[in-house]
Image: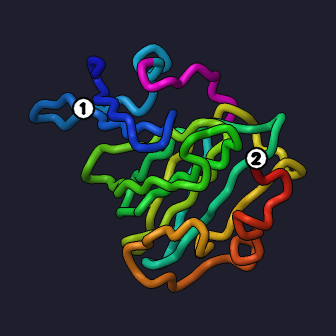
Amino acid sequence: MTDRFVVSPTALAGVHCIRRKRVGDQRGWLERLFCSDELATAGWSWNIAQINRTLTRRKGTVRGMHFQHAPHEEAKLVTCLRGEVFDVAVDLRPDSSTYGRWHGEVLSEANDTSLLIPPGCAHGFQALSDDVEMLYFHSAPYVAAAEGGVRPDDPALSIIWPMEITEMSDRDRSHPLLNDREGKR
């Protein structure tokens, strides 16, 4: 625990749930989204190279499971600014004892929770409400040639999405299955 964050490890090594503490009065509140010193307790040791914001229009939509291949791997700190999502990290680190396992967390504008995802893990989410806005802090810039992914509906992963998948991009649907990935362990 830090001054502004409660950091909880998950079953996947290096994946942490970050609960933010709001400070406020009659005027409103302040919420710290990022502090490198305080998040170091969760393992964040990288500079922020990129910040992205996304909008997902329809409830039930799944985006993911995305990552970047070495040497462009990235850590992500993922926050839901509006609406609610089921956010998922999948361990793709070949030497990890939790390789191929996933962890999911509900992130919402109401629960002040973020997910810290280390390099070597894929990330995706399902929108649990319409018009979801997400904010991502990345430790490395996006490199198109390093883009990778695994299918969100891969039977080997057995991700339990909270609702029926109503929409998924062709790109995400065409990602390889975990057992078909090049360089699998």
Residue shown at 44%/84% (left/top)?
164
Residue shown at 62%/73% (left/top)?
154
Task: Provide the residue span drawn in magenta.
Answer: 41-50
The numbered mark, 1 or 2, whose residue comes first in the sequence reads 1
Which residue is at the front of the view, 55 or 124? 124
Task: Report whether 91 appears left or right of 149.
Answer: left
- What amino acid type should be assigned to the residue bearing mark 2? Gln
Residue 167 falls inside the magenta stretch: no
Residue 58 position in % (x across, y down)? 48, 78
Numbered-mark total:
2
Residue 137 visible in the displayed image: no
Residue shown at 28%/29% (left/top)?
6
| Quadrant in the picture for residue 76 | top right
What residue would you read off at disc 2?
68
Q: Are marks 1 and 2 in contact (CB under 8 Å)?
A: no
Q: Quadrant of the N terminus?
A: top left
Disc marking residue 21: 1
